Amino acid sequence: SSQYPCYRTVEETYAAARQMTVDYPNLASWTAIGSSWLKTRGQGGYDMYVLKLTNKNITGTKPKMVVTSAIHAREYTTAELMTRFAEKLVQGYGKDPDITWMLDHQEVHLILQTNPDGRKKAEAGTLWRKNVNTTACPTSSTKQGVDLNRNFAFGWGGPGAGTTACDETYRGPSAASEPEVQAVQNYLKAVFPDQKGPNRSDAAPSTTSGIYMDIHSYSQLVLWPWGDTSTLPPNATALQTLGRKFAYYNGYTPEQAVGLYPTSGTTDDYAYGELGVAAYTIELGNAFFESCTSFVNDVIPKNMPALMFALKAARAPYQLG
Ligand code: 0X9
Ligand code: ZN
C-alpha cells in the first residue's frame, strides 16, 4: 500500500504471482481454489489462489510444504515475506544447488493472500483482522466479520474464541462456515493424505511427510498444536523438536500454542488434528505495521533461512527435526 511501500497490495501480490508463471512456466502455477466472502455474494471480492512451485518436468509424488499467509488482514509482513520467498526460489533455480534440488524433488504451495477481502479493508487504513462477513454484526460496527483463525473445523467452538458476532475473535456461526476457510481446508485435504486416525490422541506416524505453516504477525514466536489445551499433542517430542529447530533459525521463542493464550478452530490445530501434518504458526516481527526498514533488515534475514529449512524438512519432518 502507499503508506507502506514495501508491502504489496492484494492486486500487486496476485500480479507478482502471475508474473512468476509467465517468467518460469516450468516451475510455477497459479490456480484458483475458491472464493472470498464478497465474491460468493457477487459483491466484488476475490478468487482465492495458490501459487505452486516445483519442477514440472519431474513428475511423481513429492513431499509438500503448504503455507498460508495474511489470514489476518492487518498482518502485512506475512504475505510479503512469502511472496519474496517464492521469488527467491524461482530466481535461484538452476543457480543455487539447494533451491534447485528442492524445486526438483519437493513442492511448495503458497496461499499468499488467505483473506483478500479483509486485506482490502486494512489497505484502506483500518486495523482490520477478520474477513468481511456482514451478516451478524451491525454495519455500523467496525468489528464485522469472522476470525478465520477461529473458524476451522477442528475443536471449533472451544476456548479462546469469540462467541458473538462483533467480537474481534468471532468464531463464526458454525465450523468452517466461511468460504475462505472452506477453500483452505479443501486444499489441505486435497494435497495431504490423512496421516492419522480419527481421534485427537491418535499419533501421526513417524514416517509422516509434509509441513504446513501459517504465517502471522506479530510477537517473534514459533507455535505448534495444540492451541486449545495444554495436553501434549501426539508425537509431541518430534513436533517440539522441529519447532525448536525453526526457532533456532529465526531466533524466535518456541512454545505450544496454548502457552500464548488458548485458541480454538485454528489453522494449525486443523492441519495437525485432522490430517496429521506437522503444523506450525509463525508470528513474525514486532508490529502489525512493521517499518520497511525493519522488515528488510530483521524479518526477512531471520525468516528466510527458517523457511528454507522448513522446505528441506518437509521430506521427513520428524527425522530432520
Ligand atoms: O490469535 C491468533 O490467532 C494468533 N495471534 S495473532 O496476533 N496473529 O492474531 C495466535 C494463534 C495461536 N494459536 C495457534 N496457533 N493455535
Ligand atoms: Zn494473526
Image: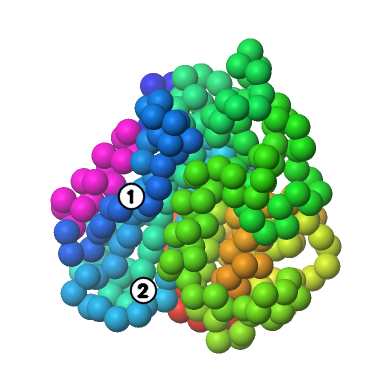
Q: x, y percentage for residue 114?
A: 47, 44
Residue at 33% of width from left, 60% of height from top? 52
Q: Is residue 97 visible?
A: no
Dividing the picture into quadrants, the one containing residue 238 is bottom right
Q: Nearer the viewer, mark 1 or mark 2?
A: 1
Residue 133 in the figure: left or right of residue 22: right
State the residue position of label 1. 32
Dividing the picture into quadrants, the one containing residue 178 is top right
Query: Separation of disc 1 and disc 2 at Cα?
Result: 21 Å
20 in the magenta segment: yes
The amino acid type, in three-letter code, at marker 1 is Ala
Residue 302 in the figure: left or right of residue 281: left
89 in the magenta segment: no
Q: Residues within 10 Å of mark 1 (few under 14, many from 20)?
A: few
Front residue of this view, candidates 249 and 141: 141
The amino acid type, in three-letter code, at marker 2 is Gln
Front residue of this view, candidates 93 and 108: 108
Task: Please state the extent of the stretch shown in magenta in the rendering.
Answer: 11-24
Asked if disc 2 is less than 8 Å from ligand 1, the answer is: no
State the residue position of label 2. 106
Residue at 65% of width from left, 79% of height from top? 197
Q: x, y percentage for residue 57?
A: 18, 74
Residue 83 in the figure: left or right of residue 224: left
